[in-house]
Image (spheres, rainbow, N blue to C red):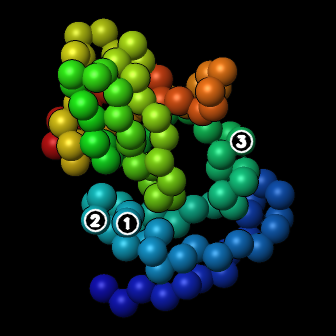
Amino acid sequence: MNFKDTMLTCEKCSRNFVFTVEEQRRLHKMGMADYEPSECPTCRQMSEKGVKLIGQVKWYDSGKGYGFITKADGSEIFVHRTSLSAGVYSLSDGESVEFEIQQSNKGPEAVNVAPLGN
């Protein structure tokens, strides 16, 4: 595929933002090649609370009970074993997951994390 930085306008705040080549490649690898964000990174982050998101497990240490998920925009978010959905006891590196974001006393954290069944 031929990727290039693209200037987009946020539907929420009307600011211009760049949909980067790096973000496009990351989405392509996740099978979301046709996705184009309608909101700037700031608005996306503000509107993520309570919304189901899709990401990929960067790494998860089942012995320690925590790891990180890479979100579609390329940023990473912490996940703890207590935030896994009922019946989910571990995550696998590279696994696609669905999750929500909740603010904890240490910052944003993935909650209600459930595998999508790659």
Q: In this view of the protein, can residue 9 be seen by the observer?
A: yes
In the depicted structure, whether residue 17 falls above or below residue 53: below
Q: Which of marks 3 and 2 precedes in the sequence?
A: 2
Residue highlighted by disc 2: 29
Amino acid identity at mark 2: Lys
Q: Is residue 112 left or right of residue 38?
A: left
Quadrant of the image occupied by residue 5? bottom right
Residue plotted at (47% across, 48% down): 76
Proximity of marks 2 and 1: CB atoms separated by less than 8 Å: yes
Marks 1 and 3 sit apart, C-alpha to C-alpha, by 21 Å
Amino acid identity at mark 1: Arg
Q: Which of marks 3 and 1 precedes in the sequence?
A: 1
Residue highlighted by disc 1: 26
Residue plotted at (53% across, 29% down): 109
Q: Is 17 in front, or is 69?
A: 69
In the depicted structure, whether residue 100 falls above or below residue 81: below
Marks 2 and 3 sit apart, C-alpha to C-alpha, by 25 Å
Classify 10 Å Cα crowding around label 2: few (below 14), some (14-19), many (20 and above).
Answer: few
Q: In this view of the protein, can residue 33 be seen by the observer?
A: no
